[in-house]
Image (cartoon, grey):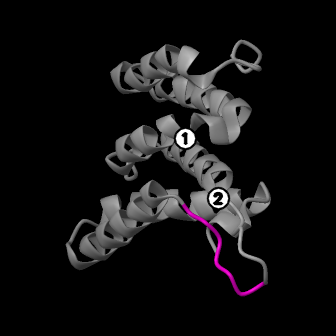
Amino acid sequence: VRFGVYNLDPKRVSWVIEKMIAGWHEASTASMQAKPLFYIKAVLSELTWRGDFLHEKLLADFSKSLAHPYKQIRQQIGEVISLIIGVAWHPSEKPGLASPPVVPTYVKGFVHDLASVLKKTAQEDKKEETTHLHDTVLHTIIHTFVQGYSQGIV
């Protein structure tokens, strides 16, 4: 999949990702749900910043599934979110160390929504959902640091 989108205009392959996004929801088993997420990650890693039109759509889609019951799916979602954060981050164009990086508004919105969901689930009595949600967030943070995208979450 990654070589199929190599050096192509991202809008020409958006239909492939649309099918993958729809496909992971329709699958019946955890491994069948994880495969499209793995392929989405491969395509996004090839498109990097050029796939920004897909980032917002994916983050909105994933925000509903952060507390997925299957660990494999939560890990794949965390890795895709980590990749999106890493490729969406841009260093500031202003000279000097004190200038903050440029983070797209859809990433800021996702982080804000995530913080409110974390606060809401902590107040409610949904221990399993809270555990799954914290597991996804922790895996995203760990993967972000391991892959060298730490500047995106700092």
Residue position marked by numbered label 2 in the rendering: 89
Whether residue 143 sits left or right of residue 68 in the image: it is: right
Q: Is residue 29 above or below residue 147?
A: above
Residue 108, given in percent of the width and then of the height, sits at: 45, 65
Question: Residue drawn 76% across and 19% down?
Answer: 6
Range covered by the magenta-colored residues: 97-103
**Could you say whether the residue bearing mark 1 is in a helix, strand or loop?**
helix
**Could you say whether the residue bearing mark 2 is in a helix, strand or loop?**
loop
Quarter of the N terminus within the rendering: top right
**Any magenta on residue 60?**
no
Q: Is residue 114 above or below residue 28?
A: below
Q: Main secondary structure of the magenta part?
A: loop
In this orientation, which residue lies closer to the viewer: 88 or 66? 88
Residue 110, given in percent of the width and then of the height, sits at: 41, 59
Residue 131, given in percent of the width and then of the height, sits at: 41, 64
Residue position marked by numbered label 1 in the rendering: 52
Q: Residues under labels 1 and 2: Cα distance?
A: 11 Å
- The image quadrant of residue 109 is bottom left
Question: Residue drawn 73% across and 21% down?
Answer: 2
